[in-house]
Image (cartoon, rainbow, N blue to C red):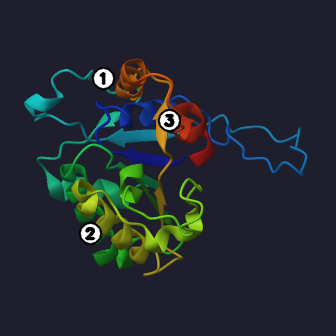
Amino acid sequence: MAKVFVNDINEYPSNVIAEVFATSPIGAAKIVDDEEDEDEDAEPSDETYTVCGTIWEDRPDVFDDQDTFAPPKEATVIKKSAPDNLFKVLLEQDVIIYSITDSERQAEEAEQAITMLVEKIDEIPARKKITFICLSSCLGWAKTRPADADEPDAALTEDEFRRRKPHYNYKKQNDLEKLITKSGKTNSKKLSTYVVTAGLIYGKGERVFHNLFKDTAEVGDVDRRQTTFTWTDCVEGGR
């Protein structure tokens, strides 16, 4: 049985991630190469993921106009007020997912978690491996200049991550991304780490397009192309 931890499961987007894992059989999602045929005989397991996570209890007033979500009924809530117990739970997980898209608070909590995992990596059983996934913001690339000055609108690629420059409000998240990447090299047999930045992710009731639609209505016919990704595809692909 695969165990999955997700932070802030009463908040978007973590609530979506937790719900998908909590209600999906293990192995239900596949990533199939365009040049390869999907194995029609392969079937997902009857087992489902065991999901747990923390909730954001002290939301600041600035977030009052945003929707909150009830944690998935299949998920177990872990209290942040008992950090020793939280860290014990993290060491028991197969997959740990931290979303840091909303605030520096999330980045600080993720930093504490990955630091603890590295410090206690010898306590992870010999045949167990923990996968740590950080869901970050595209604003971590906001100030990155194009590689070719003659093509200012060229898309940035994953290969350029070493030269990315964050928005000034996302420097904390940028530093955390570097720490997480470095931590994955500590002992790759026991800990692997990933940083996922998927552009604007939509499709589960969030308001990510509100300001874009508003600006378009006010400014008029303007080319405002933006990379997007549905939540279903993001989580299914990540699984």
Dot 3 or dot 2, earlier in sequence: 2
Badge 2 crowding class, 10 Å Cα cut-off, few under 14, some 14 to 19, many 20 or more, is some
Callout 1 secondary element:
loop
Q: Which residue is mark 1?
A: 69
Q: What is the C-alpha distance between the residues marked 1 and 3?
A: 31 Å
Residue sitting at x 59%, y 56%: 154
Q: Give the mark nearest the N terminus, 1 or 3.
A: 1
The image shows residue 116, relative to residue 135, as above or below, that is below
Q: CA distance from mark 3 to mark 2?
A: 42 Å
User: Residue at 17% across / 47% down in the picture?
Assistant: 80
Q: Amino acid at mark 2?
A: Met
- Residue type pointed to by label 3: Arg
Q: Position of residue 182 (x, y in %)?
A: 41, 77
Of marks 1 and 3, the one in the foreground: 3
Residue at numbered disc 2: 116
Q: Quarter-wise, where is residue 71 in the image?
A: top left
Relative placement, left or right, of 2 versus 40 is: left
Q: Residue at x 47, y 63 (%)?
A: 130
C-alpha gap between disc 2 and disc 1: 29 Å
- Expressed as whole percent of the image width and height from the top left, the position of residue 229 reads 55, 37
Look at discs 3 and 2 and give the one toward the viewer. Answer: 3
Q: Which mark is residue 224?
A: 3
Give the mark, 2 or 1, whose residue is nearer the N terminus: 1
Q: Amino acid at mark 1?
A: Phe
**Residue 221 placed where, x, y %?**
51, 24
Q: Nearer the viewer, mark 2 or mark 1?
A: 1
Which residue is pictured at 89% across the width and 38% down the height?
A: 40
Q: Is residue 125 visible?
A: no
User: Marks 2 and 3: in contact by CB < 8 Å?
Assistant: no
Q: Secondary structure at mark 3?
A: loop
Question: 154 or 177, which is in the foreground?
Answer: 154
